Amino acid sequence: MSDSQALRDSFALVGKSGDEVPRYFYSYLFLIAPEVRPMFPVAMGAQRDRLVAALGRIVAEADDPDRLLPYLRQLGRDHRKFQVVAQHYEAVGQALLATLAYFLGEAWTPELQHGWTEAYTLVARTMVEAAEDDARVNPPWWNGEVVQIEPRGFDLAVITLRLDRPMAYRAGQSVMVETPTLPSTWRSFTPANATRADGIIEFHVRAVDGGLVSPALVYGLRRGDVLRLGAPVGGRLTLQASGGRDLVLIAGGTGLAPLRALVEEIAWHGHARGVDLFVGARDARGLYDQQVLRQLTEANPWLRVTPLVGADAGTVDNRSLAGPVLRAAHWHGRSFYVCGSPSMVSATVRDLAGAGVSHDLLHFEEDAR
């Protein structure tokens, strides 16, 4: 992109106006293209955050096409579930330029307008082409019929779906989910099982205080309901990142789901390797999936599961699970996967790195930093 530093500088200047920026953008977009409003949720807070995050990443990686272009292609594929088509990108571009012009004021020069126009043209073209390529092989979304709901606590449920068509995903990838009661409101969940030929997919869902989608799934879902699922995304928690090494998996709460899926992928589709799985919980009731884990350990001698309960599961001031893990596991040269609450992940990764685990062997969700 031409003069990417100018894009970054101008975006930083616009960012000083805070939440007013995405509010202006969406107000302008819905004014010039009212037909796109039903694509968005009624409550726009999370959507505004995603817009700012996406724009920030695009300008930050403007000089790094090896990182930026795959991200844009993934965005293009992912936006198919919103029924976005090529002509919608023109309206978005108009709204973006109008927003930048409004907040930059006199700093909005013809040169800057040209640079942003050129940058957005590349973004839109890349996303449209990726969406068109994906449409040749995948649907815009999958329908998943609820076949079982198992409460595993007052705020947690294991939900089993049967998809209407095969979905090829790697263990550790996530999918966006939409419930029939909250149209256009999508939230990310990670399957707890590896890909199955029968189309069965399992989610572990905890109702988040003040959330929308997770409480609707835990408390409002009924057998026979149909959810929509977006295309699988992400690669930080997938096995391909580990290079075939033995693994140390560290789970907190429903962060167990993607790590259990990794174990299943090794058992069903991969070559056996040493795996230590640590499952953290505040108390024994938090070890909600012990029966399945016992079955996996009985069937796979390369797997060892260790529960971490009480003091071993961290404290209010320090959620780190690194201490008991490093004392219990032979960890030198192994790949570490950490998944759970953001506070647990950041504290555990910090302590693992401090103990000498190299960064290239630490795998965790980037937004948990």
Image (cartoon, rainbow, N blue to C red):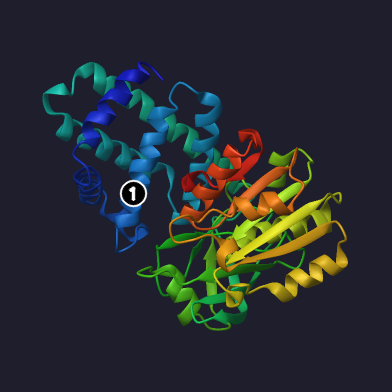
| Image position of 58 (left or right of 132) | left
Question: Which sits in the foreground, 89 or 9?
Answer: 9
- Decide which of 340, 258 is in the foreground and name it: 340
Q: Residue at x 75, y 39 (%)?
A: 332
Q: For residue 246, say whether it is visible.
A: yes
Locate residue 234, reporting x and y percent.
58, 46
Label 1 element class: helix
Judge from the rendering whether residue 338 lies leftward or rightward of residue 39; answer left or right: right
> Which residue does the image show at 74% across and 44% down from the upper left?
331
* Residue type highlighted by circle 1: Asp
Which quadrant holds residue 296? bottom right
Image coordinates of residue 220 in percent, x first then y, are 46, 81
Q: Quadrant of the N terminus?
A: top left
Tell me residue 200's x, y (percent).
Answer: 70, 69
Using the rendered image of the protein, determine whether residue 170 is visible from the camera's viewpoint: no
Choose top left, top right, bottom left or bottom right for residue 276. bottom right
Crowdedness near tag 1: few (<14), some (14–19) or many (≥20) residues, C-alpha within 10 Å: few
**Residue at 55% in and 34% down:** 70
The x, y position of residue 153, in whole percent, is 54, 80
Does residue 224 lie above or below 175 as drawn?
below
Q: Which residue is mark 1?
A: 49
Most extreme residue toward the left is 106
